[in-house]
Amino acid sequence: AQSVTQPDIHITVSEGASLELRCNYSYGATPYLFWYVQSPGQGLQLLLKYFSGDTLVQGIKGFEAEFKRSQSSFNLRKPSVHWSDAAEYFCAVGEVLGTYKYIFGTGTRLKVLA
Amino acid sequence: SQTIHQWPATLVQPVGSPLSLECTVEGTSNPNLYWYRQAAGRGLQLLFYSVGIGQISSEVPQNLSASRPQDRQFILSSKKLLLSDSGFYLCAWSVGQGRETQYFGPGTRLLVL
């Protein structure tokens, strides 16, 4: 069955440090992959998406993600974290089984230390 | 530009009472519409989605129901709320067949007491 796994429930980094959030998926074909960010009490905002082509995808707010088919991963990275990046991050797979559905991971909550 | 609205923003309801949450989208036609529930530490659970007026797909059997009376209106309802219905409810829209970005509303926080 299709699934998305975010193995880290919580991550804490210092401001200015680099960040990598992990996402692994289980999917039978080339997936459509998304990363979203959610600030407390708010809806989700798209950071970036991968459909095809270049496996390194650039997004908003200085984030990037790399699609690695061999590892079934789509990890999110940022070279230098800002305090305002503290939020919850969700990885998702779209067009599940050719449908209109998306599957989301359980999220990673990022804490940034000043 | 497209916008998505949800109301109310916050709701406190007693167990056994009815529920109606509304979601409307502006600036697009024939969107796919989705209802998700978010419980603490459990990510987003897809409850219902709709690809057109009157077309509702249910993902999780429970005491909730959804309706789409108009192209850009999606309503989540319950006849009798349970304690377990508490959570953060998010509406989203997209176009296409799941390859496109989903755009989320601001959410409704529901507390059932």
Image (cartoon, coloured by chain):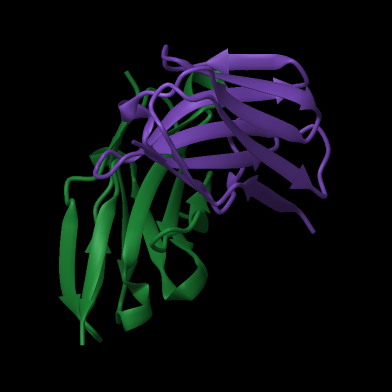
Residue at 38% across, 29% down: B85
* Residue A92 location, quadrant: top left
Left or right: residue A114 versus residue B51 is left
Looking at the rendering, in which quadrant would you find the C terminus of chain A?
bottom left
Residue A13 percent location from the top left of the image: 17, 75
Residue B102 percent location from the top left of the image: 58, 44
Tell which of A59 and B112 is nearer to you: B112
Q: Up-down: is B80 above or below A25?
A: above
Looking at the rendering, in which quadrant would you find the N terminus of chain A?
top left
In the picture, one chain is green; tell me its letter: A
Count of labels in the image: 0
Left or right: residue A33 versus residue A85 is right
Residue at 26% across, 54% down: A108
* Residue B43 location, quadrant: top left
Which residue extends farthest top? Answer: B61
Q: Can I make out residue A55 in this image?
A: no
Q: Up-down: is B35 above or below A43?
A: above
Tell which of A92 and A111 is nearer to you: A111
Q: Up-down: is B104 above or below A81?
A: above
Q: Can I make out residue A53 in this image?
A: yes
Colour that chain B carries in the picture? purple
Residue at 60% across, 21% down: B66
* Residue B16 location, quadrant: top left
Residue at 62% across, 46% down: B7
Residue A30 percent location from the top left of the image: 45, 32
